[in-house]
Amino acid sequence: MNVFWFLPTHGDGRHLASAVGGRAVDYRYLRQIAQAADSLGYQGVLIPTGRSCEDPWVVASSLIAATERLRFLVAVRPGLQSPSVAARMAATFDRLSEGRLLVNVVTGGDPAELHGDGLFMSHDERYDLTAEFLAVWCRIMAGETVDFTGKHIGVNGAKLLFPPRQAPYPPLYFGGSSAAALQVAARQIDKFLSWGEPPDQVAEKIAEVRRLAGLAGRSLTFGMRLHVIVRETEGQAWDAAADLIRYVDDEKIAAAQQTFARFDSVGQQRMARLHGGSREALEISPNLWAGVGLVRGGAGTALVGSPESVALRLEEYARLGIDTFILSGYPHLEEAYRFAELVFPLLPLAERRETPVAGYSSPFGEIIANQAFPRQRAAES
């Protein structure tokens, strides 16, 4: 199991839809989160993209030297970047980070935002554009000199002079729920991402992507993006979930849902159906809570519960075929520590950062009465 964390370049705090408990997200704070994720053993971080976010390539580049092993999942935007320019950016980042780049292919689902960026295409046209973009991008990254004339993209003699560190190119991640998106995933993507839906819905989507990939003579792997609210007991976790939306009232829900209604993203529509714009019955599957999506676009669900419950639910998704989880929690710095300390010991992690057993190591917990060390951690017993 691979576990990633999230850099909140659109804002962070202790409560949704409120400045109460909010905090400034500047370089120092993003560096804190990235370095915490790096030292705790998260394998990477997702950096979001869009009008409400700081630019992901600038943010990721600024954190290369501040981290050691952490990988960065950074977006390319078909229609907003040419494939050759995006290839140069990706190759440069991959070399300078010594192979720590992962590429998130984001087609976009908000027509109003895309119009502001100069992209005027229908939903399915954008996925046709994405397919052409990837056809050119992948060949350039693999070292080819590319001539291509498509419906949306045309290049002559496009090439890289400086190749990426990873061959033939950094892995491609991609999410989408429409028929057009699933076709792109099946034919061109390495890891297909789903938002956190009930297991039966996730299983159905995985089966369809696998079927389509098989028809194309391909296979791919699967990941999931969702939030986590984990506490030492079930009651504490559900209390924390209620506290997260303490300031979310009906007016704020209505305003947010009105904005999301303009999206032509099928995935966003699926998220909205999980809660129906109501605070009632937000536990839509055991330990799966749709409260975040009342006011937040994109990933709108969280796993809520004790460490044992959350680990159990992650393993249920893993049995469906999910091998990578991209997680987040509010506030992101504290919750990165909380999740790693409480849940990592219960998971079959692909990579585990072991504490040295020989030589001096700093104490785990505060020294008692100036002379006694706390008892050995449960995870080591």
Image (cartoon, rainbow, N blue to C red):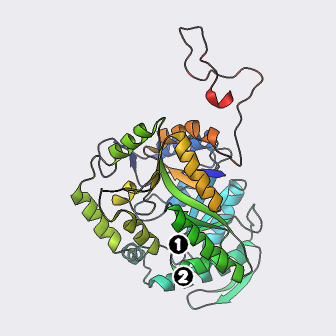
Query: Three-letter amino acid code at disc 2?
Result: Ala
What is the number of the mark on residue 176?
1
Viewer-nearest residue: 65 or 278: 278
SS under mark 2: helix
Who is closer to the viewer here, 165 or 274?
Answer: 274
Q: Is residue 103 visible?
A: yes
Q: Is residue 25 left or right of residue 36?
A: left
The residue at the point 65 percent across, 72 percent down is 189
| Residue in view at x 53 percent, y 42 percent | 336
Image position, residue 249 (x, y; %)? 24, 54
Give the class, few, some or many, for how many residues have Cα within 10 Å of label 2's Cα (few <14, many ≥20): some
Q: Callout 1: 10 Å neighbours few (<14), some, many (20+)?
A: many
Separation of residues labelled 2 and 1 (CA atoms): 8 Å
Q: Going by the picture, which residue comes out furthest to the left?
A: 251
- Give SS at disc 1: loop
> What residue does disc 2 label?
180
Tell me what residue is drawn at x 53 percent, y 70 percent. 106
Left or right: 131 as drawn, with respect to 247? right
Q: Could you say which quadrant of the image residue 185 lies in?
A: bottom right
Residue 100 lies, in percent from the top left, at: 68, 55
Residue in view at x 64 percent, y 31 percent = 379
Residue 160: in sight, yes or no?
no
- Above or below for 305 versus 146: above
Q: Position of residue 122 (x, y in %)?
A: 44, 85
Task: Determine whether, in the image, residue 374 is placed left or right of residue 288.
Answer: right
Q: Position of residue 21 (x, y in %)?
A: 33, 41
Amino acid on which disc 1 is placed: Gly
Q: Number of numbered discs present?
A: 2
Who is closer to the viewer here, 305 or 168? 305
Q: Which mark is residue 363?
A: none
